Amino acid sequence: MSMKKKALSSKVENVEATGEICVLDLPDLILDSILERLPPDGLCKMASVCTAMRDRCTSDPLWERHMKRKWDRVIGPAAFREWQWHIVSRKDSGFLERSQRRGLMRSLSRLWPLSLIVSNFENTSTRKSSLPVHSVMSWYLALETGKYWFPAQVYNRELQNGHVGFMLSCYDAELCYNSRTDTFQARYPPHGRRAVVVENSVTWDRLRAPPIDTNPHDLHNSVCLNELRPGDHIEIQWRRNKEFPYGWWYGVVGHLESCDGSDNYCRCHESDMVVLEFNQYAHGSRWRQTSVHRKDHREEGNEADGFYGGIRKLHSSDEISIWRQLWPAEVLE
């Protein structure tokens, strides 16, 4: 008799002997199917039943589903690297200071049974933690409770602060989740003489994981220039001056001034110059249009109009749709 059949037979005999059904008496496939359907708080509660359930309910495959379902859109490679560094720093510092522990325990208590929380904060040098810091569940709870700031990008930064100068742009920021309001606090890094800027109540629809794993101060290598044609949707790096980080700005490829826009006679794609249009701005605005060199494009611009950097062509209809949803109600000057 195989090991699986023996285990199943033992469970059946246990039910027959006691007349009662325990969750752990269920076949593994059925039990796993039930646990997969539980929400995060349900898994946390089930984890306090016994050691066997704790091991099942804190397993990475279960929590990877919840991570993907809730956080996949805003968590990218940069956030994962930051979390790995966070894990190492926690190990090196002997976990958390006393005051930090109390704050984290209050937050976790809304999701995780108190008995498990307390055991997790006991001396990790003498006994194994009930929740390994490198587990997916640990990462999920750190995000959910707002105790972990992670890097992502914010559309239309500082919108809640009444700033309309960043419409149809996307900038890097550090984010912290507020589960009570289901919104985020964004912290934009300092640059030049400008201090850290904080924006509250940032909604999910204004966030994304960086589509390109590039430092915001580095020029993106534009590999799409030779294929750009009028009507293509693009994002281009732009910054006010050399001290600022780049943000990504939405635009479309336009026609050269010498072209009448006819599909039959347009040869704009053969020119060394590419016209970029930002139609959220009014005709005559200095921000409405710019041109870049197709073959030897590097950072171009000046202190008055800012500096244009790398370009990425948008192939995904979902990405284009998000930009259209963010379109300002009024034309910008």
Image: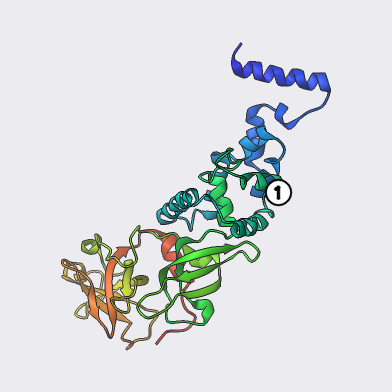
Residue beneath label 1, please? Answer: 114
Neighbours of disc 1 within 10 Å: few (<14), some (14-19), many (20+): some
Residue 136 screen position, x and y as percent:
53, 45
Residue found at x 27% / y 70%: 309
Is residue 240 shown above or below 179?
below
Specify whether residue 55 is in view: yes
The foreground one among 65 and 256 is 65
Is residue 25 shown above or below 236?
above
SS at circle 1? helix
219 on left or right of 325: left
Residue found at x 50% / y 64%: 175
191 on left or right of 55: left
The foreground one among 249 and 179 is 179
Q: Quadrant of residue 63?
A: top right
Residue found at x 66% / y 19%: 7
Q: Quadrant of residue 181?
A: bottom right
Residue 115 screen position, x and y as percent:
70, 45
| The N terminus: image quadrant | top right
Q: Amino acid at mark 1?
A: Leu
Task: Tell me the colour scheme of the image.
Answer: rainbow
Residue 271 screen position, x and y as percent:
16, 70
Specify whether residue 39 is in view: no
Q: Quadrant of residue 259?
A: bottom left
Residue found at x 78% / y 28%: 21
How many discs mark residues in the rendered view?
1
| The C terminus: image quadrant | bottom left
Residue 236 screen position, x and y as percent:
32, 69
Name of the residue lying farthest toward the top: 1
The foreground one among 183 and 255 is 183
209 on left or right of 262: right
